[in-house]
Image (cartoon, rainbow, N blue to C red):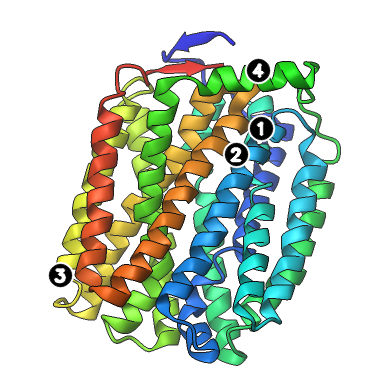
Amino acid sequence: MAVQESTATLRIPLTHTQTRLIVVAWITYAAYYFGRVNLSPVLAPLQADLHWSKTEIGLLGSVFFWSYGIGQLINGALGDRLGTREFVTFGLVAFAVANLIFGTSSIFIWMLLIWAANGYFQAMGWGPILHTLAQHLTTEQRTRLSTMFGTSFVAGNALTWLLVGLVVALTNWRGAFLVATPLMLLFALLWWLGVRDIRSHGQESTDSSLDFVRSTIALLKGRRIWIVALVAALVGVVQGGFFLWTPTLLFEVQKIPLDQATYSSVILPIAGIIGIVGFGALITRVLGSERAPFGLALLLFILGVTVGLYGALVGQLPIFSALALLAIVGAIAYAVTSLILTLLPLRLGGRARSSTMAGLMDFAFNIGTSISGVITGLLLDRASWNAVFLFWALAGIIAAALLTTQLPQLGKTVD
């Protein structure tokens, strides 16, 4: 793999095939969220109906992110070696079935296992989809893509919460999972048909399995990669924990009715779309490719400070002011997450290892989210929301400090 310094490159327009691939990939990954973030808006009614503690609710969220993170590590490497058409389709169908089973169950241990399986199947999407895109795009096109492709998971999140709010209002918390099944099957068909005549350049590795494992291990030995992975984990602590508990936060602290709290939570992903496009353009286009990591580190520090500020003020502000500050947090958090999970894998992994790097970053991010989920539940059971916000704010500030130590090395890209 040739290492290239980040310099200005020719802006190459997208072909019809590239455009179609990006659109299908964007829609497909947005669809993943219909079977993933449908848990967060129904935490309160699920807890009331099944009589679970907040620690058990936190464990449910944590086990998902553990299995999802492990799945990213495994499926990310497989995504660099295997064809992605069948791989992604299977994942969509499998977690459609998992949501159906979860929505018809009531036993904690059984639902815990099913939600863990759902997490693993969800991990069959991000890395392989990024690998497919990397195979068909130039380095300059991948950089441009990284500033907007994160809007796919933000839009998926927003649409899911809107749909869940409507479904729960008409039925009950189980409807949030039962409605996901037919939707996932529909989008599985869309992906299968949408990429049927698209072939990746050298996607199926000609290396032996042993050579593939050895080259992957050699890639993962780099100290820089693991520090960046730790940064991704800390971002997961902030963004994952904050977003999982937002509807409950609005319900308990702001005293907003549950259905309105769910709708109000949509302000996060909506602001996130603006944040991804705005901050992404600022960092990658204004600062330039070589200075992009500096912009990301600065944005991380601002995220930590803003989360702490929100925690200090949320109980004192009028509802509209609190929601405005929440929107600012959402814009920054989604921009940081998008750049961590899209820009860095495409830059550090290149064509050959984009899925592996995406899997590693997503694995670390979701390990952080899983830790945040259970620790947040414990802090709420034994302390207060103030302790939770301090926990999240410190994670963001530490992540910024760690990323700053790697700035000289992160100005390089791999093709």
Residue under numbered circle 1 = 77
Cα–Cα gap, marks 3 and 1: 43 Å
Q: Earlier in the sequence, mark 3 or mark 4?
A: 4
Residue 408 % position (x, y): 30, 17
Q: What amino acid is found at the position of numbered circle 2 in the picture?
A: Leu
Cα–Cα gap, marks 1 and 4: 12 Å
Residue located at (53% from left, 68% from top)? 60
Marker disc for residue 29:
none
> Residue 312 appears in which quarter of the rendering?
bottom left
Q: What amino acid is found at the position of numbered circle 3 in the picture?
A: Leu
Q: Earlier in the sequence, mark 3 or mark 1?
A: 1
Left or right for 60, reference 407: right
Residue located at (49% from left, 61% from top)? 62
Q: Earlier in the sequence, mark 1 or mark 4?
A: 1
Q: Which element is circle 4 on?
A: helix
> Residue 260 appears in which quarter of the rendering?
bottom left
Q: What amino acid is found at the position of numbered circle 4 in the picture?
A: Arg
Residue 131 % position (x, y): 66, 32
Marker disc for residue 214:
4
Q: Which element is circle 2 on?
A: helix
